[in-house]
Image: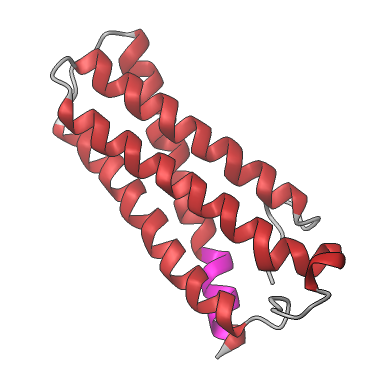
Amino acid sequence: MYPFFKYFHSGLRYIVLVLVVAAVIQSLLGWLGKKTYTEGNRKLNLFALISAHTQLLIGLVLYFLSPLVQFSKGAMKNPVTRYWTAEHITMMILAIILITVGYSRSKKVLLPEKKHLNIFIFYFLAVLIVVVTLILSHRGVLGMSA
């Protein structure tokens, strides 16, 4: 089961990144161009949110299947084990929290510019966290995850 979830999680990352980056670009253009917040904007932002949450669920399954995640006494002394056991999951959950907060806040405001601004700020911060976290894996953004 581990190989299936590893490749599924690694492959789904591209869909998540494309959707979240597309939402960031769309929201930036909407905010700067003072455009209306359309149903298409809402759907893209929602699909980005759903894909990120789906990725989290698959990642949680993988977390308990991965041989790189260890709950031993010396796990935090080994940089690779520490990364996969603590750092990766913590930062990814933080990124998904930011996406969720951004989407939620955008639903509550009335002005279209504020909707776009909320999505831009929170989704952009999430993308930064994801990219930095993947770089810290020493496999890069395009490498396969463990």
Percent of width and height locating residue 86: 66, 62
Of residues 135 and 109, the one drawn nearer to the viewer in this rendering: 109
Q: Quadrant of the C terminus?
A: bottom right
**Position of residue 124 in the picture relative to residue 131 (left or right):** left
Residue at the farthest front position: 73
Majority secondary structure in the magenta region? helix
Of residues 9 and 68, the one drawn nearer to the viewer in this rendering: 68
Percent of width and height locating residue 119: 35, 29
Residue at the farthest bottom position: 1
Residue 17 appears in view? no
**Position of residue 110 in the picture relative to residue 138 (left or right):** left
Q: Quadrant of residue 104?
A: top left
Taking the spot 69% from the left edge, 76% from the top edge, the residue there is 69
Q: Quadrant of the N terminus?
A: bottom right
Of residues 141 and 89, the one drawn nearer to the viewer in this rendering: 89
Which residues lie in the magenta part?
A: 4-11
Taking the spot 72% from the left edge, 60% from the top edge, the residue there is 143
Percent of width and height locating residue 121: 43, 25
Taking the spot 55% from the left edge, 84% from the top edge, the residue there is 4
Taking the spot 70% from the left edge, 66% from the top edge, the residue there is 84
Q: Quadrant of residue 116?
A: top left
Q: Is residue 28 above or below residue 102?
A: above
Percent of width and height locating residue 115: 25, 23
Residue 32 appears in view? yes
Q: Is residue 28 magenta?
A: no
